Amino acid sequence: MCSQGLHLFRPPPVSTVQYLPPSSLSPDPAARFAELFSLKPRWLEADMSLYIDDLTGGDKKKRDALVLKFVRKVKDKDTTWWTARNLWSA
């Protein structure tokens, strides 16, 4: 599953495209991250940034604090993935 812009693309066997504007997600950071990680378990930084930058008003320090609190960075060869730091119930 990969994302591009504000759409999530799911590859076969169940290929889908889902429009996902940030405004459709919770304004609460914990709920927002839970929603995003329920959609897919790992994200590229650039893809997830599209969905969390509005929470911080573009403030890099606030964004980094949210990432530190809710995201675990996992390196896979040359790619760094963002996964959930905690498991939330849906």
Image (cartoon, rainbow, N blue to C red):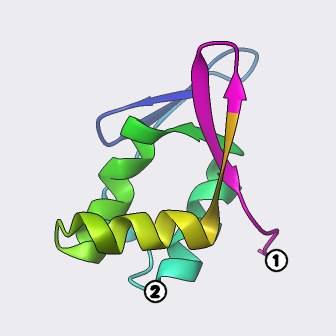
Give the crowd class for mark 2: few <14, some 14-19, many >=20 residues within 10 Å. Answer: few
> Residue at the bottom extreme?
28
Q: Is residue 5 visible in this depiction of the protein?
A: yes
Q: Quadrant of the C terminus?
A: bottom right
What residue sits 48% from the left and 79% below the top? 29
Question: Element under label 2?
Answer: loop
What residue sits 82% from the left and 77% below the top? 89
Where does label 2 land, which residue? 28
Q: Looking at the rendering, which quadrant does residue 47 occupy? A: top left
Q: Is residue 83 magenta?
A: yes
> Residue at the front extreme?
61
Give the crowd class for mark 1: few <14, some 14-19, many >=20 residues within 10 Å. Answer: few
Q: Quadrant of the N terminus?
A: top right
In the rendered view, would you say 33 is above or below 47?
A: below
Three-letter amino acid code at the position of disc 1: Ser
Q: Looking at the rendering, which quadrant does residue 34 occupy? A: bottom right
Question: Element under label 1?
Answer: loop
Front one among 57 and 23 = 57
* Inter-mark Cα distance, 1 to 2: 15 Å
Front one among 86 and 64 = 64
Mark with earlier residue (1, 2): 2
